[in-house]
Image: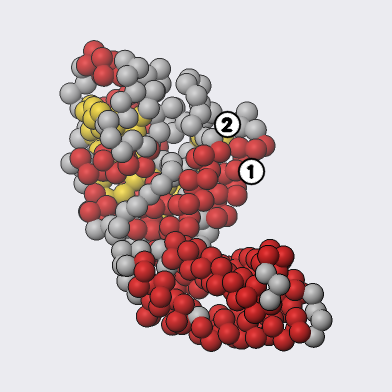
């Protein structure tokens, strides 16, 4: 019998119907394999009878934690991990999709040297219950591909995971969003040795699925956050370039508008250039240099204008010259923006990163 101390964290929200069968399955694991197993149910104030249910079941190895603030699956998991006393921590869903019978194998994997264990549908021996549907299957596969920059795990979206409490305590800047905390923990706990334990993933029998469009949008945000953590310079430059491209388009559109308002090219083109530069500043500050928003926006704006002056003047005079050569304003602005951007993109990025948006 394994004497390892294990804490199973079960985040819940309106899972009253699923909890009895889950706890019965965990109790069997506890009696057969892991006598020092404890359960922490982290409930996001469901008000569905969960509190009365746990009190009535009278399992002294089950602890209920009710949260009323900062609710959400990922924060609930972190709260459970913080409260865990076991050497090993297991996180699983309450809806019956994760088999409790796989917990001993996941703990054993950690004892044998793995830094992280995942209950996997996609390794040899893993299966998924029929009735999932094509769209849900496609969603899982796309999400797995999006996680590939961070891990080679075949099923990083499983949500059934295990790690040492010490690994969690040594994590860096946990900042999850959405419903998939596993990928966050693999990256932020710097887990290199990840083992996948085959499981049979069951379709939810009771309650309603939490998989919505908003959840998928949150996952995309999560991927961006992780890329910022693992590849900050690349993401910053890529975003800076994308904003610059959008600024070139904005400059062309602005010229179309300003040329209809002002008859003098110098005024209309100059105003369009200033508007496009302000556009770039707003989005660069928010997305390309996301970690530099704690400084004075006025000083950053003035510095941004100063650094962008040279490519902006190239943009301006090229547009002015082509307009004087009877090019129509949109085409002249397009050429001016393209050449100005090509001249300034690397110079502007380096100068704004180190002198305007430094941390």
Label 1 crowd (10 A; few <14 / some 14-19 / many >=20): few
Q: Is residue 102 left or right of residue 89?
A: right
Q: Nearer the viewer, residue 298 or 180?
A: 298
Residue drawn at point x = 39 percent, y = 23 percent: 15
| Sequence order check, earlier mark of 1 and 2 | 2
Q: Position of residue 263 (x, y in %)?
A: 71, 72
Residue 72 can be seen, yes or no: yes
Residue drawn at point x = 65 percent, y = 33 percent: 133
Q: Is residue 123 above or below residue 127?
A: below
> What residue is disc 2 on?
129
Label 2 crowd (10 A; few <14 / some 14-19 / many >=20): few
Q: Position of residue 145 (x, y in %)?
A: 57, 55
Quarter of the figure that contains the C terminus:
bottom left
Residue drawn at point x = 37 percent, y = 80 percent: 355
Q: Is residue 350 above or below residue 42?
A: below
* Label 1 with label 2: CB-CB less than 8 Å: no
Q: Position of residue 287 (x, y in %)?
A: 47, 62
Q: Is residue 334 left or right of residue 227?
A: right
The nearer-to-camera label among 1 and 2 is 1
Helix, strand or loop status at disc 2:
loop
Q: Nearer the viewer, residue 65 or 346?
A: 346
Q: Is residue 152 left or right of residue 315?
A: left
Residue drawn at point x = 62 percent, y = 75 percent: 267
Helix, strand or loop status at disc 1:
helix
Q: How is the image coloured?
A: secondary structure
Disc 1/disc 2 C-alpha distance (Å): 15 Å
Quarter of the rendering containing residue 24:
top left
Q: Nearer the viewer, residue 32 or 258?
A: 258
> What residue is disc 1 on?
138
Q: Position of residue 45 (x, y in %)?
A: 30, 26
């Amino acid at each position: 019998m394994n004497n390892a101390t294990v804490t199973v964290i079960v985040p819940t929200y309106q899972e009253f119907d699923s909890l009895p069968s889950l706890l019965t399955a965990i109790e069997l694991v506890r009696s057969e394999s892991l006598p020092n197993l404890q359960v922490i149910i982290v409930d996001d104030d469901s008000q569905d009878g969960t509190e009365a249910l746990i009190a009535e079941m009278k399992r002294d190895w089950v602890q209920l934690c009710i949260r009323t603030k900062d609710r959400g699956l990922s924060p609930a998991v972190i709260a459970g991990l913080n409260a865990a006393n076991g050497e090993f921590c297991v996180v699983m869903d309450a809806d019956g999709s994760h088999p409790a019978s796989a917990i001993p194998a996941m703990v054993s994997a950690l004892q044998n040297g793995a830094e992280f264990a995942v209950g996997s549908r996609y390794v040899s021996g893993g299966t998924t219950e029929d009735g999932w549907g094509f769209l849900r299957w496609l969603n899982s596969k796309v999400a797995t591909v999006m996680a590939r920059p961070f891990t080679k795990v075949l099923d990083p979206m499983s949500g059934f995971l295990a790690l040492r409490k010490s690994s969690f305590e040594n994590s860096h800047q946990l900042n999850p969003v959405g419903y998939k905390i596993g990928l966050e923990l693999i990256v932020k706990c710097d887990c290199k040795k990840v083992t996948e334990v085959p499981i049979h993933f069951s379709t939810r029998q009771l309650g309603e699925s939490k998989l919505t469009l908003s959840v998928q949008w949150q996952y995309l945000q999560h991927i961006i956050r992780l890329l910022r953590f693992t590849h900050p310079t690349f993401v910053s430059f890529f975003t800076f370039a994308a904003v610059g491209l959008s600024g070139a388009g904005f400059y062309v559109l602005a010229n179309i508008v300003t040329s209809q308002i002002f008859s003098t090219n110098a005024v209309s083109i100059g105003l369009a250039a200033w508007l496009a530069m302000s556009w770039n500043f707003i989005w660069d500050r928010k997305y390309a240099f996301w970690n530099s928003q704690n400084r004075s926006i006025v000083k950053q704006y003035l510095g941004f204008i100063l650094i962008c002056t040279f490519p902006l003047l190239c943009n301006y005079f090229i547009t002015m010259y082509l307009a004087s050569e009877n090019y129509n304003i949109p085409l002249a602005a397009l050429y001016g923006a393209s050449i100005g951007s090509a001249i300034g993109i690397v110079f502007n990025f380096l100068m704004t990163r180190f002198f305007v948006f430094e941390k």
